[in-house]
Amino acid sequence: MIEPSPVIVRSRDLIRPYRPADLPALRRICLLTGDRGKDGTGRFSDDGILPDVFLEPYLTLAPETAWVVETDGEPVGYLVSTLDTRAFSDRWRAEWTPEYRRRHPLPEPGAEWLDRIADDAYFWLDDGFPAHLHINLLPEAQGQGAGRALMRELGLAALAAAVPGIHLVMSSENTAARAFYDRLGFSQLAVEGDAVVLGIDPRRLV
Ligand SMILES: CC(C)(COP(=O)(O)OP(=O)(O)OC[C@H]1O[C@@H](n2cnc3c(N)ncnc32)[C@H](O)[C@@H]1OP(=O)(O)O)[C@@H](O)C(=O)NCCC(=O)NCCS
């Protein structure tokens, strides 16, 4: 077992495991960066939708593979993930979908894909790439190595658990994020409508 040790990115920056007290700050980061890398405020009728789909279920169901980057003690970014998407999907359906529907009783107008994720726990299942992730940094925290450092944490955790591959699903419109993933060595596994599935061997991230 590799101990989660804080990693210094810049002198004022720290990468560390998630703590429950981070939740409000991380929900805000998710909203401000969650619409294909841009501010998602007002995108849907309820600003809680993006963090309720792309952040909080991961912090609830898989907190051990969530990391935070902070500057001067304030969270400015995070990576959330699961090492086992299949098991995560089952737990999402059993444990998160009821909570999601308690918070959002009605389908979200114009966002059927979000309701589909929330209700059906619809994930990319690939036994060669069982882990998946979401990574989000505030604009002021981007371009300084924090994204690469967060990915290293996930790579180490995946290697420790003998996970053979990590994937992510992203909007093909998010060209900046795509350049980041290309630079880290991800390769394209599939195209599904407007979404692209990328994958990598965790050894390439450490
Ligand atoms: C995408 C994101 C996670 C990248 O993190 P980051 O901290 O900005 O990236 P880093 O500074 O660690 O960059 C790592 C490498 O990728 C390269 N890179 C990063 N963004 C790039 C870009 N837009 N174009 C070209 N290269 C880029 C860097 O040059 C760097 O290369 P090097 O380490 O070999 O010098 C971050 O910008 C972000 O959170 N964006 C908004 C939310 C988002 O879009 N999330 C992804 C959703 S799929």
Image (cartoon, rainbow, N blue to C red):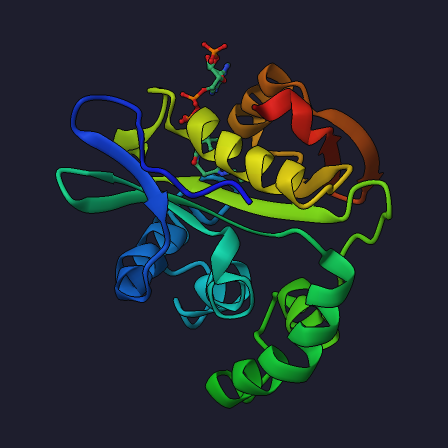
Question: What is the residue that sits farthest to the front in this orientation?
Answer: 1
Please state the horizontal and vertical placement of residue 157, each as a whole percent of the image: 57, 42
Where on the picture, by quarter, is residue 195? top right
How many labels, in total?
0
- The residue lying at 83 percent from left, 53 percent from top is 125
- The residue lying at 32 percent from left, 60 percent from top is 19
Horizontal side of 52 relative to 98 (left or right) equals left
- The residue lying at 65 percent from left, 21 percent from top is 204
Q: Is 30 situated above or below 99?
A: above
Please state the horizontal and vertical placement of residue 177, each as a whole percent of the image: 54, 29
Question: What is the residue that sits farthest to the left in this orientation?
Answer: 72
Horizontal side of 21 relative to 182 (left or right) equals left
Horizontal side of 119 relative to 81 (left or right) equals right
- The residue lying at 54 percent from left, 80 percent from top is 100
Q: Nearer the viewer, residue 166 or 203?
A: 203
Question: What is the residue that sits farthest to the top in this orientation?
Answer: 183
Q: Quadrant of the N terminus?
A: top right
Q: Nearer the viewer, residue 76 or 103?
A: 76
Q: Quadrant of the C terminus?
A: top right
Please state the horizontal and vertical placement of residue 174, each as a whole percent of the image: 56, 33
